Amino acid sequence: MTDQTLISGAPRVKLKWYQVIDPITKLLFILDMTLLSFASTNLLLQAGLILVATLLLLFSKLSSTTFKALGFSLFLIGTMLIIQGLFYSRNQTVLFSVLGVSFYKEGLIYATTLGCRVLVIILTSGFFMVTTMISENAAYLELSGLSYKTVYVLISVCYILPEMMRNMRKIQQAQKVRGTNPQKTLIQKLKSVLPVLIPLVIKTLDQAMARSISLQLRGFDNLNRTVRTSQRVYRLSRTLHIGLTGLAILLIGWKIWTKINGL
């Protein structure tokens, strides 16, 4: 039997499971996971969401960027645990004391819940970033009917944390070169990071605005611009869109209902 792929000169490449899921489905999945995380304060549910997001990463593709993002996020979560455990406004029950400093149960639970939500967002966004290309995402989203500006906002949100990490590495390298902070111990690392958190966020947002202006000057927001056609064929796209959108609506409605009824 003649091999048709050899005749055509285009061998068929077997796609992995995450490559046949379209970008909109992945974005809706991130939305649903985030809504589930914010809709409940149950730590068991939060742990389940983190487990699901972690398994998706393990069975798809891992990257050094994801590990660095997790490391940075865990550092921020650790900072939140210390601050909220000590100074949360609803602190009442002392959970434990270290060197005479008391940490409170209410603040630690509150910080843990916030930390879990951060991890859910980071892990699901990491799955999106490592399994899709920016160019393919932008092309597919525009072909689906979204405006260029909406596409840019969505893509920028997903890639803002890696940008912050790159800026942080540049700042740390500059500090080491100048000898302003050796960063040999954890305390020294904390002292070097905390003062630059706000400038770091501002710099990252400023870079996003600069990219937006650059793309506008190149005519990317021109209504007559020809959008590149997506080369991939995705499976069950419409069904997944409807299902995930319906779930998001239910979660939002349930959260509004609980707020109105004071639950």
Image (tube, helix red, strand yellow):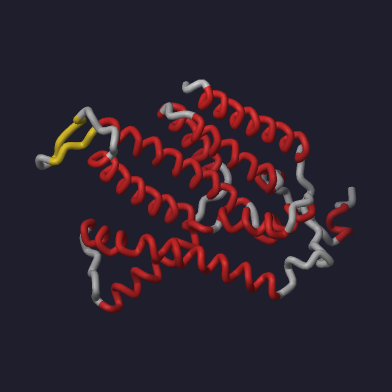
Q: How many numbered marks have been drawn onto this rendered protein structure?
A: 0
Left or right, 124 with respect to 112, comes to right
Identity of the residue drawn at 48% across and 53% down: 66
Would residue 125 be found to the left or right of residue 75 on screen? Answer: right
Taking the spot 57% from the left edge, 67% from the top edge, the residue there is 209
Across and down, in percent, residue 32 comes to 59, 36
Q: Residue shown at 44%/61% (left/top)? A: 201
Relative to residue 245, is residue 222 drawn left or right?
A: right
Position of residue 7 in the picture relative to residue 151 (left or right): right
The outermost residue toward the bottom is 178
Q: Who's the residue at 81% across and 67% down the image? A: 225
Foreground residue, 240 or 35? 35
Query: At which x and y percent is residue 176?
Result: 29, 73
User: Percent from the top left, x then y, of residue 210?
Assistant: 57, 71
Q: Residue furthest front?
A: 260
Residue 158 in percent (x, y) is at 56, 53
Q: For this rendering, which residue is in front, 36 or 19?
A: 36
* Picture quadrant of residue 113: top left
Q: Which of 180 and 216 is in front in this view?
A: 216
* Residue extending farthest left: 100
Residue 255 found in image quarter: top right
Is 1 located above or below residue 205 in the figure?
A: above
